[in-house]
Image (spheres, helix red, strand yellow):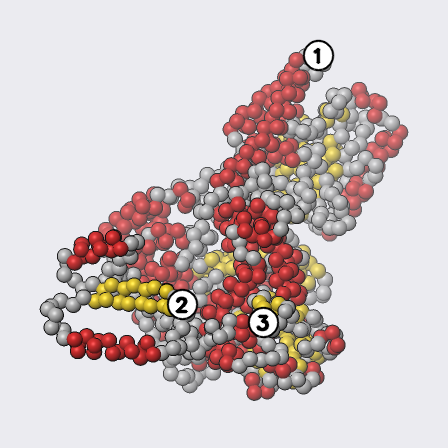
Amino acid sequence: MNPAPHPTIRIWQQNLNKSSRAQLDVLNDTSLADFDILALQEPYLSFLGLSMATPNWRVVYPTPHGTHSVSRSRSLILVNKRLSTNAWNPIPLPHPDVTAVTIRTGNTAVHLFNLYIDGDHDMAIRAVSRAAQCLVLSEAGEAHHHVWLGDFNRHHPAWDSPANHHLFTTDNLERAEVLIEHLALFDLQQVLPAGIPTLEATRTKNLTRPDNVFASPSLLAHLRSCAVVRDKRPTKTDHFPVSTTFEVPTEMAPARSRRNYRAVDWEEFDKALAKRLKARAVPTHIDSTAVFDATLDHLMSDLQATIDEHVPEAASTPYAKRWWSKHLSKMRKEKERLARLDYRHRADPAHSSHAEYRRHRNTYADNIRAAKNDYWKAWIDSVDGKTIWDANRFLKRGATDGGGARIPPIWVESEGGQRRTLNSNEEKGAEFHRTFFLPPSTAGVPSGPYPAPRFPFKPITNTQVRHAIGALRVFKAPGPDSIPNEVYKHCADTLTPILGPLFRATFSLHYYPDCWKVSDTVVLQKPGKTDYTVAKAWRPIALLDCMSKILSRACGTHHFRFHPPGRKTVKDAWRRGDVASVVFLDIKSAFPAASPACLYHNLRSRGVPQEYVDWLKVKLDSRKTRLKFDDYTSDPFDILSGIDQGCPLSVILYAFYNSDLIDSADTSDGEKAVGSMDDVALVVTGKTFVACHDKIRRFMDREGGALDWSRAHNSVFSLDKFSLINCKSQPKRIGLGPPLTLSDGTVVRPSDHHRFLGVLMDQGLRFKQHVALVREGSCLVTQIRRLATVRNGLTLPIVRRLYLAVVVPSLMYAADTFLTPVRKLPGHSRAHGTVGHVRRLAIVQRQALLAMTGALRTAPTDALEAHAKVLPFDLLVDQSCHRAAVRLCTLPTSHPLAPHIQRAGSRFVKAHRSALHELLDAYHPWLNYKNTERIAETRLHPRWRPLHHIHVLEDREEAAADDQHWAQDGAYRVYTDSSDIDGGVGAAALLYGVGPTGSPSLCDVKGLGLPEVPILMTRDFLRY
């Protein structure tokens, strides 16, 4: 339901003199929350080119803002979030000192231009005039109103006071005439009455009129007020604000209430929920869909009633600067009172009110800066081991202006090849729907026969439900039911006995409720895109019902983490004297385009039990979703294909979905396909690159190949986004190699590197580009330095923990792939391993150590590492690689990597060693697959407790006293001890028996010791 239109458009214009304190004063003024538009001239901009705002305002920058051709923008528009995004759109205008928006009211468009005109030229005036003419010509059938406002820096008797006749020079009047001529083109008339000053000179206190407001005559008929508000002048600026109100109805955004789940007493919440559910007498076994629906409805109503009772609604504040205080608001009121008094006595320069006003205004500005700094210092001092992740989120969020986000107008190509702009939310939603949700596949799907299931079907247990609830992340966006994860996590003991029977009944009844099939699809930016005016630069994320996500997570099975074998394949080819080509495939809209029928067929073909497949058929049938972006929510529509991005099962399901593409590679002919989800790479080997390219074409074109898979699975390849790397052991001699020409004529140009699964793969597999990118991209260290200043920064233990928990994992991502431990080999004087890579990455650690300790830049690195208690970087690499090697050597024999690990560790390769060879050779002979113990996982009930008690004592006196205490129980007691003396290790275990010396006999005791003899004789007993 859309809210009633607001009866007016309220505009507040202000020149801020580039002052941050002036802009903060404006943003934290609660009285401005009722204005629809803040038109700012000369706003504050940081060194990154970003202004300041609050989430209540959407920021509109000039069109060329942020480009290399513009040094600084001097115009800015803030649009209140209460104004519907469907009611306004930015106007593209190629000038850095002009921002413009169109506000639509029914069939009428109000074009508002916010100008800052330089005193030396008229380019901004001419740019606005051209843009206004284009708007009138492009929308000739629509009524238009124009508003030009801002800092015009023009003086003329038509608006200036006659007392400023000294400003009416010939040059000033000629420049003012240029403005008047362009105003006459659109018949714009002056709105602010003549003679009212808008600026007070800082030194002379002379009052002038550089700011102005002009509007169309048809809009002037709806004018309610236009006045200068002198007492509201912010600090650190000499311009007075101008308030303008037109009686024009505007569409408002729907109000959305939020609940504050951080202020909930969860113990009381759980008790109230348990009391309600106990009164319902919820069944423990569900045998019909009617009982299922009734139980689910009762559960949802009780949850909602408990939320209404115990979860308060979050108060919506007109400003969002946490450091703003009531004291500052009180000082601002006093400043405004003194400003009125100062203006009242303007004719008496000697009156005391002028000095008092100036003194209080400066004190107020200093208090704004102090309050902001004090809040920052207090937050820095409050960061500890528990809140360190708040600091991490603060660092990773990056620089923003703090304003609300908005999807810009979307460009599409019409049938005639012309570009068309989509401005309304309905048009954007239709384009996003067309882009995200592709039509279902019409290709036939085989119907079997299918192999026997690889594993039996097992009903979901309450333990699995409890684990699935425990894995939920808190404070995430909820689904259509608006019940967040926190409710389930804090009430797991109460809800698990109810959710368990419901989840089991979905399988036994072949039933999936309709409320679980409804989702909200949120439109988010794809990171790293340069142009967000096309629909492909955005991606859909499904917000599912939380209860259905718990069910999906409980159904998820464990799957192996594959170590990419592509590097080993290439090195094996080089060892044989061959070459290799790697082509990286790109699948368009992989998840939304997936065909459910093909997914069911692949699951059955891979041995998934029919019960799970039948459950998925019910789950994925008759789904509905709503698109949500900005303040817009579309009507529900059907989802005819695709896998929900946001479902815990989506990754596993797509792994089954594209398994046929991976398996279509002919390994006997030098082909191997590797990948994860929609990132797939084909590695082919051959004598020449021509032979490799022939194999790639056969892989694409043959029956059952990639193109057949694409047609059968409704997954279209983006051939223009394919990437090719021609790999040879000496890439400098061949360059990039020949291009690949596909059968349809598409030419894939080779490159020297490509990102695959987060790692930059290069021609020689030396990973120089990846190391350079990791080193240059370590902006986290720079961000940490901002928090670790000597005077007002984080303490050393917090910065150290932040470095080890955030920066080191980013540096060590896939370290076992491109780094090898640095070590000295017998008979060699030089270090062995990736010495250069480790040395380059160690520079990042040195920068972090300087930030931690605050030491001089010339301080030695080893001293910094000792004081910060951080391992040298080469040892960090060794630690990471050793951990990876231990994990590989402890994989079960059933793991797909097991034979590769066993073969790579059993023989030493002299030339073209892969990462697997280097990793296992670095820790040989202490670590190998054959002699490493593999401990089978044991799952125990959460309430399981061992039948024995373990006591570890500090010294022999405590052990003797403890032994006397436990001897009174008459239970069996086993004593263990071990020691390391003279290079030998010994261990013993002692068990006292009950009875006389002859029972058991001496022979019986010897018989008990005989089974231990083979263990003592075994020398190969090293275990990890």
* Mark seen at residue 350: 1
* Mark seen at residue 825: 3
Residue neighbourhood size for the residue with mark 3, other residues' Cα within 10 Å, grouped as few (<14), some (14–19), many (≥20): few
Residue that carries the numbered disc 2 in the rendered image? 983
Q: Is residue 52 left or right of residue 888?
A: right
Q: Quadrant of residue 667?
A: bottom right
Q: Secondary structure at mark 1?
A: loop
- 72 over 23 or under it: above or below: below
Picture coordinates of residue 29 (x, y %)? 57, 32
- In the orientation shown, which residue stands out farthest toward the front? 982
Picture coordinates of residue 217 (x, y %)? 72, 36
**Residue at 42 percent of width and 74 percent of height:** 932
- In the orientation shown, which residue stands out farthest toward the bottom? 668
Counting residues from the N terminus, which is met first, the one under dot 1 or under dot 3?
1
The residue nearer to you, when weighing 389 against 95, is: 389
Counting residues from the N terminus, which is met first, the one under dot 1 or under dot 2?
1
Q: Tell me the kind of residue under disc 3.
A: Leu
Picture coordinates of residue 365 (x, y %)? 62, 28
Residue neighbourhood size for the residue with mark 2, other residues' Cα within 10 Å, grouped as few (<14), some (14–19), many (≥20): few
Picture coordinates of residue 447 (x, y %)? 44, 83
Q: Tell me the kind of residue under disc 1.
A: Ala
Q: CA distance from mark 1 to mark 3?
A: 88 Å
Q: Secondary structure at mark 3?
A: loop
